[in-house]
Image (cartoon, rainbow, N blue to C red):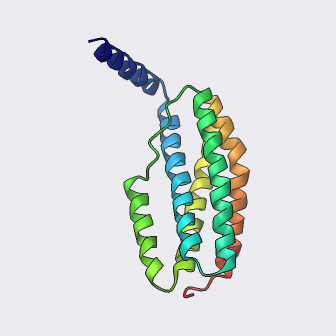
Amino acid sequence: MYRLVTLMICAFATAAIAADVPAPTKTFIDKAAVANKYEIDTSELALKYGKSADVKSFAQQMIDDHKKVGEDFKAALAEAKIEPPADSLDVAHTAKYAKLRLFTTEKGFDHAYVNAQLHAHEDAVATFKDYSANGPTPAIKAFAAKTLPTLEHHLEMVKSLNAKTPATD
């Protein structure tokens, strides 16, 4: 009985915390978590299946930088007293990952990876820019503002890499 009451209290407390999170913050948190995981997961594929040294170097930097971003994200969530979202991809990103995974047995992986990172970073920069300017939760807004320059740098890096990555490797 005591265990059941404890579980009910924890569930209520979590629901209360979730209910206090403004909708724009919830949307941002979900997008940021998925984007970060996607960029790490696809970069791990690139380390394994990439052909060019430039692609592998970029992939390693994405893994290192986005793991750090993940740590900063968790700290911001803790400061805001918000439960972290599940560490998983959403349906759209799972499909994108699966599509990229198909290239691991074909030519063109480097180009497909770079293209995926280009689109992912364009989306991330737009999302972080908007939230850092308009987000209603101070700790999460500060995280977005702190992370935005890193994401903008990644976008410039991947644009440069895209210009020199052929469609077939």
Q: Residue at x 64, y 60 (%)?
A: 62
Q: Residue at x 34, y 20 (%)?
A: 7
Observer-nearest of 117 and 127: 117
Q: Picture coordinates of residue 136 (x, y %)?
A: 59, 31
Q: Picture coordinates of residue 1 (x, y %)?
A: 26, 12
Q: Residue at x 51, y 58 (%)?
A: 38
Q: Picture coordinates of residue 59 (x, y %)?
A: 63, 67
User: Can residue 4 be seen in the rendering of this structure?
Assistant: yes
**In this figure, what is the number of numbered marks?**
0
Observer-nearest of 49 and 54: 49
Q: Residue furthest toward the front?
A: 2
Q: Residue at x 63, y 34 (%)?
A: 75
| Apparent side of residue 75 relative to residue 84 in the rendered image (left or right) | right
- In the image, residue 167 sits, relative to residue 48, either above or below, namely below
Q: Residue furthest toward the left?
A: 1
Location of residue 169 (image quadrant): bottom right
Location of residue 139 (image quadrant): top right
Q: Picture coordinates of residue 143 (x, y %)?
A: 66, 39
- In the image, residue 134 sits, relative to residue 66, either above or below, namely above
Observer-nearest of 126 and 69: 69
User: Can residue 129 be seen in the rendering of this structure?
Assistant: no
- In the image, residue 136 sits, relative to residue 47, either above or below, namely above
